[in-house]
Image (cartoon, coloured by chain):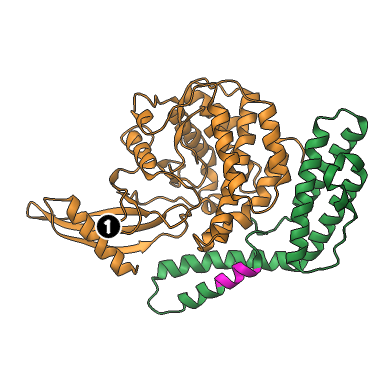
Amino acid sequence: MTSADLASRLAAYAASRMPGAVGVEVRDLSRISGGASRQTYRFRLAWTEGGARRERRLILRRDPPASLIDTERRVEFAAYSAFHGSEVPVPEMIWLEEGTKALDQPFSVAEEITGFEAAPALLWAEPYLSAHATLARNKWTLLGHISRADPFALGLDRVMPPPSPEACWVRELDMWEKVLDEDEVEPLPITRAAIRWLRAHPPPPAQKISVVHGDFRTGNFLYDRQGGIHGVLDWEMAHLGDPLEDLGWSLNPVWNFKRDLAGGLVPDVVAIAHWEASSGLRADPSALHWWTLFNCVKGQAIWISSARAWIDGGNREPIMVLPAWGLQNAQDRAILKVMGRL
Amino acid sequence: MKPDIPAVLAEIAGLAARNAAPDVDPAERAGALGLSAALLGMAAEAWDGAAQRLVEENQAVRALLADAGERAGENASLASGADNDLRISTLSANNARLRAALIALHVAVEGDEAPEARALESRIWDELRLSTERHRLSGALA
């Protein structure tokens, strides 16, 4: 589908969802690079309503034929919607379309939050470097807010099956080991050793059942030069589970960006203190160690899946090769580090 | 590296040809170029040493299997193999068989308290650590 076709069909879809609008147009549709699990575009939606011409900047996220992360768009949409208007800043979700008639693939449309950065690469130089302490405090405070939230009060248990506190770890480990079993391209001695260790040393039951963002890391939020965070993005792996799972993902050494600091920003102990203060929960060191190692396994499963999707031909975009080539070895070293074997 | 480098290079060649068309969206072209450049850099770095790394690794795992003796079980025969065919595809296939055997050996020694098993497990971890260093790329993302 060409960009012009996509814009035309998107405008027709928008018109069908806006009965009071006439002259609906999609302008300046352009693909945003990256987006390994969704094809992401920004555009301006213009229309006339009540005699006035209006315009809004929006984001289209459309499923590719095969993606880095196989998730249900409905779950992602529900997670964003649940936190919209809360102390966790997220873009407003506008439409969810699970059918394939309109744009050949399921998609969602959301508000575009403009004027901020998401790319980690900018963070390692001024003026952002001086704001690391503030950014880290905001980052792990927001994660604490997510952990503290009541997923049942938010209604998220209707779309995300809640595990029992005792079963959080085994459900997640079973799921990601199955991904590895199905998608493994070559034997993975380090990852398999980590899985055996995880099964032999299970963590204690979760303190509470929380919303787990699933991919809360540097690179998945919009930040400014002063360390403010204006949007938490990429909720496609959101689910209910142990709040330490998210903290462990944020401490996965592959997200250190070669700086030996949590998220490339601050020592782990500082990140954990911010999260504990905000969440009101405790990060038991041995339990957090389990969840950090688990997240190294989960990361490896995701990078392996991207290689599998590319090899099987479902998605031949270069973004699918980048994590397989650029992160798999680093993830192995991260596993060795977390296991004390490096 | 998986996917295999030649297959990725062929895909990047096709992508470059498609992006040479004048009507490609500039943002899409820029994104494809940036990603392609990153992959080409990694492929270039990995290419020259690929055979050497695989041969080294295969020899190291064969040595572990040989020293494991009966603990290597049905994989013991792999210890006497050799890399006579130096094509990357053949070396990689041998490597995959040997790594699978290494996993089985690791499982076998993990629960064994005998001093020989403890020593063997320590050597397995040493090899796994060395393996990650062999495959490390300066242009990796992390």
Q: Chain of mark 1?
A: A
Q: Is residue A193 left or right of residue B69?
A: left
Amino acid on which the number 1 mark rests in the picture? Ala
| Secondary structure beneath label 1 | loop
Instruction: Classify residue A43 by image quadrant.
Output: bottom left
Q: Is residue A8 left or right of residue B9?
A: left
Q: Position of residue A207 (x, y in %)?
A: 52, 20
Between A117 and B91, the one lying in front of the other is B91
Instruction: Classify residue A191 by image quadrant.
Output: top right
Q: Is residue A175 left or right of residue A210?
A: right
Is B11 inside the magenta-drawn segment? yes
- Camera sees residue A187: yes
Q: Which residue appears farthest toward the front when viewing the image?
A: B74
Considering only vertical position in the picture, is A134 above or below B113? Answer: below
Q: Position of residue B80 (x, y in %)?
A: 90, 55
Considering only vertical position in the picture, is A13 above or below A340? Answer: below
Q: Is residue A308 left or right of residue A43?
A: right
Q: Residues within 10 Å of mark 1 (few under 14, many from 20)?
A: some
| Residue lying at 60% horizontally and 40% vertically, measured from the top left | A177
Secondary structure, magenta segment, majority class:
helix
| Residue lying at 65% horizontally and 66% vertically, measured from the top left | B5
Q: Position of residue B48 (x, y in %)?
A: 76, 68
Is A280 inside the magenta-drawn segment? no
Circle 1 residue: A102
| Residue lying at 58% horizontally and 41% vertically, measured from the top left | A178
Between A314 and A127, the one lying in front of the other is A314
Q: Which residues are magenta?
A: B6-12
Q: Colour of chain B?
A: green
- Camera sees residue B141: no
Q: Colour of chain A?
A: orange
